[in-house]
Image: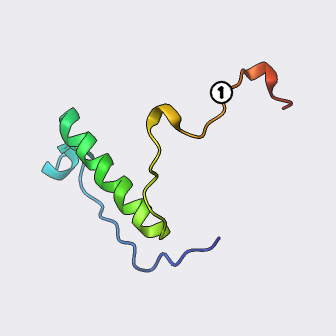
């Protein structure tokens, strides 16, 4: 799938600059969890689908061993 990358921007900063020394994500676990929560909600909104209503315990997954795979 091709995407239009024209609106994407980037900055080049010196490794000695203040910006290069700042962490790329929030420094505390609480802030990182908040960021992941916000990004997840935004991702679901972009899909146009409602947030899943199932709990972690009832998530629709299948657990298998590596030996059960054909590849």
Reply above or below: 13 against 71.
below
The residue that mark 1 highlights is: 63
Closest to the observer, 29 or 58: 58
Q: Nearer the viewer, residue 27 or 13?
A: 27
State the residue at coordinates (27%, 40%).
Answer: 33
Q: Secondary structure at mark 1?
A: loop
Residue density around tag 1, few if under 14, some if 14–19, many if 20 or more, within 10 Å: few
Residue 36 percent coordinates (x, y)? 32, 47
Q: Residue 5: percent from the left, percent from the top?
A: 48, 75
State the quadrant of the C terminus.
top right
Q: Which of the 4 quarters of the picture holds residue 38?
A: bottom left
In what quadrant of the picture does the N terminus appear?
bottom right
Left or right relative to 19: residue 43: right
Residue 2 to residue 39: above or below: below
Residue located at (25% from left, 57% from top): 13
Residue most extreme to the left: 18
Location of residue 56 (image quadrant): top left
Decide if residue 31 is on the left or right side of residue 59. left
Q: Position of residue 55 (x, y in %)?
A: 44, 39
């Amino acid at each position: 799938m091709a995407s239009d990358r024209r609106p994407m921007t980037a900055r080049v900063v010196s490794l000695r600059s203040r910006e290069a020394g700042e962490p790329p994500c929030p420094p505390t676990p609480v802030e990182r969890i908040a960021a992941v929560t916000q990004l997840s909600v935004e991702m679901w909104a972009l899909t146009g689908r409602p947030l899943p209503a199932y709990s972690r315990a009832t998530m629709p997954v299948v657990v298998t061993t590596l030996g059960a795979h054909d590849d």
